[in-house]
Image (cartoon, rainbow, N blue to C red):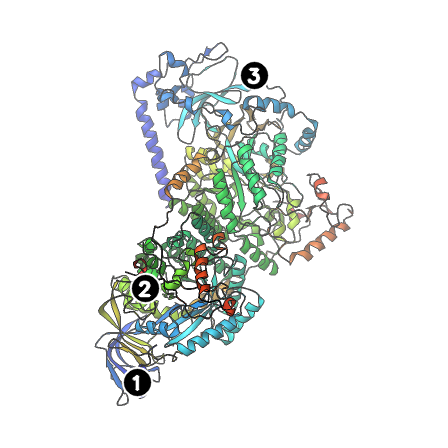
Amino acid sequence: MSYQGKKNIPKITSDRLLIKGGRIVNDDQSFHADIYMEDGLIKQIGDNLIVPGGVKTIEANGKMVIPGGIDIHTHFQMPYRGTTTVDDFAQGSKAALAGGTTMIVDHVIPDPGCSLMAAYDQWRQWADEKSCCDYSLHVDITHWNDSVKQEVENLIKEKGVNSFQVYMAYKDYYQMSNSELYDIFTFLAERGGIAEVHAENGEIIAEEQTRMLQMGITGPEGHVLSRPEELEAEAVFRAITIASQTNCPLYVTRVMSKSAADIISQARKKGHVVFGEPITASLGTDGTHYWSKNWAKAASFVTSPPLSPDPTTPDYLNTLLSSGDLSVTGSAHCTFSVAQKAIGKDDFTQIPEGVNGVEERMTLIWDKAVTTGKMDENMFVAVTSTNAAKILNLYPRKGRIAVGSDADLVIWDTDSIRTITAKTHNSATEYNVFEGMELRGAPQVVICQGKIVLEDGNLHVTSGVGRFIPCSPFPDFAYKRIKARKQLAVLRAVPRGMYDGPVSEFSMSRGGTPSASARNSPTKQPVRNLHQSAFSLAGNPAPYGPPTPDDIPIRPAGRRIVVPPGGRSNITTLS
Amino acid sequence: IYVARTELIFTVYSIRARLRGGAVRDPVRRKTVEAPVIVSDWGDSPSVVEATMSDCRRQWNREDELPVYLAGPINTGPNQKKSYGMFSSVEGAFESKTIDFDNYAVGRKGSRTPRSGSRERVLDAGDPMGKTSSEAREGSLTNSTGETDDAHPGVESERLLIKGGRVVNDDQSLYADVYIEDGLIKQVGENLVVPGGIKVIEANGRMVIPGGIDVNTCLMKHYLGTQPADDFLQGTKAALAGGTTMIIDHVTPAPGESLLEAFECWQEAADKKACCDYSLHVDIPQWNEIVKDELELLVQEKGINSFQVYMAYKDVYQMSDSQLYEAFSFLKQLGAVVLVHAENGDLIAQEQRKILGMGITGPEGHPLSRPEELEAEAVFRAITLGNRVNCPVYITKVMSKSAADTIAQARRKGSVVFGEPITASLVTDGSHYWSRNWAKAAAYVTSPPLSPDPTTPDHLNTLLACGDLQVVGSAHCAYSTSQKAIGKDDFTLIPEGTNGVEERMGFVWDKAVAMGKMDENQFVAVTSTNAAKIFNLYPRKGRIAVGSDADIVIWDPYSVKTITAKLQQSASEYNIFEGLECRGGPALVLSQGRVVYEEGKLQAQQGTGRFIPRKHFPDYAYQRVKFRNQVNRQQGVTRGLYDGPVYDVVPTPKYITPAPSAKTSPISHQPPPIRNLHQSNFSLSGAQLDDNIPRRSGHRIVAPPGGRSNITSLG
């Protein structure tokens, strides 16, 4: 929490800024132009701008000027068993700004059974008090019923939330059944929300955890052993299936493994509207550290889904990110101190989950994807900022350098090299999962809301200036296709004459053999009753009437066929 | 790709032909052909049967004029009597492969041996109860004129010689005579020494293949109190007419019903009625402790090694993932094969509600509410479960391209998974659900539904030919139109099932072999041998070899017939393959060494079918699993004890965010002893009145005496 920003940068000068001689990089093109900002907005872009005298001018010297990063997935100040993550909104957003990220989207996690609205208000309060950069919120749906439905509707309509996360893991706690997922996705598709999903098969995880603990594996390696990447891939597959049935756009948070990423990219090739979000940790490191002899180090990597022990995973995910199969990057920044992690020192299932990454996100992608030649600078902007803005319906206010957009800019230094270490990072934790990594590329100047927050290596942040940015429903990026499909995919019945052939007698009380969930669908009952009463007219009183359980075993296996008066009609004969 | 594949197959053919041709020209070997084999250990006066087959053989197959097999080495020493012609390229290799049938007699020791079994059963068949019902049915049949009750099968039906045929197994084809006695294959080879006066069947160079095994039939599946139109008698008659000499039927207990009772009920019915050998799968309708005990009993004593679980039929049969995990683990311990009906039942229930709500009540609602994605999703999930538990998984009824692709992909990744397409999915598609004729549309209703994509059958046949799918079932479950009409106002009530047991072999030949996708050996593999291997019947079934059961089909690849309900054996009045032409069919069918079908005449005998018990841990499925068990031992990391600071967890947690399913793992139910100790430390520092109230979010860190040790510092 540093307040020195206030005295170092007088308000008058910071309101008007000119960036000269930069190369503006958007997701679609790069060009040389100057940028003039006033009142936190970009007012002019071009050469030889006419600007008022006395504005502060920053010389970019041909360096890249990119839209500030949007970290679409953070957990700042997240409560956990009476404690909270060590990075609150002030500390977390400060780390974000230091890494070139000018907007974060945090997850609101209501306790199961608690009101979504109350949790949302709580998060708003925390963030408004402390956040140093603009923020927005996802709301996690941790249970599902009619009142939650109402709250979700209100959140979409009035509170500026358009993305909701559901869980397929955390059995008996957050986990949703397939039917609930179907309901939620259907509901969100109607209201224009984005369904985000934490994709892991919770039921199998629970079984595997039990097995691991029985085998005497209690250390952090049990975490990854009990959550193999197949379970992630399976859940992703299932989530995509449900989303495509309900015609709802799907967003898979935390893509951690090759197989999960493959499933997403396959589904995209088949035309599904699905977005994948790898996180800093999955793009930068792997799960071999879970076997570290140092408990604290091993525990610091614990997150769900876990990092894959396959060391080729980061490279692979970077490739898919470059090719566009994965769309956005988050950090899933959720930091607990070693002492907090040690809650699970005797049982890996108790280790609080989360890794750092909000500060390292942009640099790491630059180093792993752009300098290795996988990705160009425009794609870099797309995956770190623009795509996120599009999904959240904030584009072009965020995620683009254009006249009228927010003045969230980063001057990116492609040549700087720094070594990541917990000693110098801005997070409050005593470890860093990227410890010792040498990364090329870093922000040189960061401008947030038209104010310089990072310059010459000095961070000048102001706690509490962050604004909540409301997201509106039906983002075109996700819903254009959905809407078009909705019009096409109208199911129609085949118009047939009435079937008037013989109908075999049957008893409904029979413990159903494949009468596929006949009993669930309430619409059927009246139809069936009508049907039975029609029969009694045909003059066969004895066997009809409500079948009792007794008469089933007695009845011989032979079929009893009622021939209607008038004989069989044409419509039922087989040609 | 398809063209390339056919070309490849042709290349293989021609190479094979060339190889044969090359060997034929070896003059030395050719001579040995003429040497008669003398088999002298038969009780009857042995008569030497000369090799007279070569003529007709040349006539029948120009491609391999003089097969290499004729030139097999033949001994002239004293051991000669045990020689099996070309089979004994390694001397004595055959002894070990003869089956010890006592091994198979699980649970029914003494009561029946395979040889006497058939006789006794013939007498049983004379009981009036069974007769009347069968005769009543026969009246309606058009094609069973030759059906006779052969109460005293003469010697000639017990001893048979098939001469001059080309024996086709899954690994090779060879010219050989087959001698059968007492329902078993006694000799295979050239110039067999057989007793005089036996019945000789001239195969005239036609293919002699092991009888088909239909791994999926439902001949007694109750539906709302009605039984399928085809019971064990009708069903097995249809099977025999199609060249299938063994069926494996599904025992489908109702939820809550005892598995054991259902099994006995099925067995009783089948013993009375079945005309061919049969075995049973048992479906698991629910999962609890009683079921576990029953499963153990079924495996250990009743000779059942395959059980089906359902991922569909919500609130009826469906199991949750946790239950599936437990069921898989349990069945793996028993060494059973897990059959999975793979469809996502939750989503189907939702879709059905939606579609009924839209006013779609006809059969087209069936495929609309069960899109193929749901099948692929469940297949994927089942395979994931199988991988986690390290248990072989068998997917019944593969109906769609995406499900088949999912299986093929998983096999590439090394999963032990088997896929079973059915006759219907290999031949026809789901476009008929939109037929204007309700009865016709309803006839196609089965689950998972036939895919409306018309390219599906072709794709499935290709995967079957290349080995990605292994066995073909029929899922024969025939309901009459009036039974189907139970669901005339609501498609979810239409009883599910299609016919296919009779057409199965013919259509696999027509769609795969005649199209050049598959060779005859693979044909035998997918229709018979693979099934026998997966379900541990091999080599008793699924192979023509000395000691195997005499379930043999003489296959005529050139016969052409048009499928129609009028000429079928099945009792239902529709046939979903109506009007299709099918090349290839059985010319003669032997079941248990008796001719049951010849030139269109069926001579099946009710009640002759024996229950074939199956042992657990089939090698074909479990060998890999066993090795993996040994390899995949997970081990913890040995670390020093963590002695750094530990955050004090509030005992009554108000916020429990991602404590991943802490409550489900029984071990974490009670806090581990160490933590309790730790907490008691705290109370020493002075118990407070508000101890029970959740603490505020401030951190309380306990520094151990002596400060932090090295082991926890981050380096």
* Location of the C terminus of chain B (image quadrant): bottom left
- Name the chain letter of the residue that bears numbered label 2: A
Q: Is residue B683 visible?
A: yes
- Which residue lies under the disc numbered 2? A431
Type of the residue with mark 3: Val
- Which residue lies under the disc numbered 1? A7
A283 versus A413 height, above or below: above
Mark 1 residue element: helix
Q: Nearer the viewer, residue B78 or A32?
A: B78
Q: Indicate the position of residue B367 as horizontal and vertical percent values.
A: 55, 52
Q: Nearer the viewer, residue A274 or B29?
A: A274
Tell me how far mark 2 sits from mark 3, CA to CA: 87 Å
Q: Nearer the viewer, residue B92 or A230?
A: A230
Q: Is residue B397 visible?
A: no
Q: Indicate the position of residue A469 as horizontal and vertical percent values.
A: 42, 76
Q: Nearer the viewer, residue A283 or B4?
A: A283
